[in-house]
Image (tube, rainbow, N blue to C red):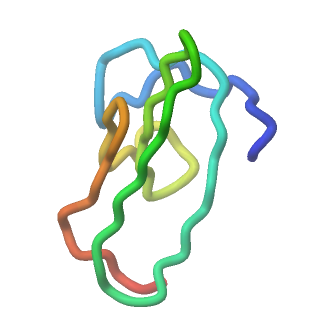
Amino acid sequence: ATDGTSRWPSYPACSAANEGGPEVLYRVEVPRSGRLRAFVFDRGTVDVDVHLLSAADPSACLARNDVEAALVQRLRQR
């Protein structure tokens, strides 16, 4: 979903922090094993965080951070 709808107030698998606010979800299909890094950039006073999920579910959070998140484990092909 790229409509910015507020879906989840937290991502319990990654953090106990209040992560309320609109989400924008992107699906990434990995063509072969490798590493994945994602970056986000804030605009003005908005606090944007990046979360890497294995599914469209807040409990499927694999990594999070304020600017950059990375998976250091090997990703498997789908």
Position of residue 15 measured from the top left corner of the image (x, y, whole percent): 29, 26
Q: Residue at x 31, y 35 (%)?
A: 65
Position of residue 7 measured from the top left corner of the image (x, y, whole percent): 66, 27
Position of residue 29 measured from the top left corner of the image (x, y, whole percent): 54, 75
In terms of depth relative to the viewer, which is nearer, 73 or 36?
36
From this view, report whether residue 76 is shown above or below residue 71. Answer: below
Q: Residue furthest right?
A: 3
Q: Residue at x 38, y 44 (%)?
A: 61
In terms of depth relative to the viewer, which is nearer, 24 or 78?
24
From this view, report whether residue 3 is shown above or below residue 38. Answer: above
Q: Residue furthest left?
A: 72
Q: Quadrant of residue 34?
A: bottom left
Q: Residue at x 34, y 15 (%)?
A: 17
Position of residue 56 measured from the top left corner of the image (x, y, whole percent): 57, 49
Q: Is residue 21 left or right of residue 10?
A: right
From this view, report whether residue 6 is shown above or below residue 27. Answer: above
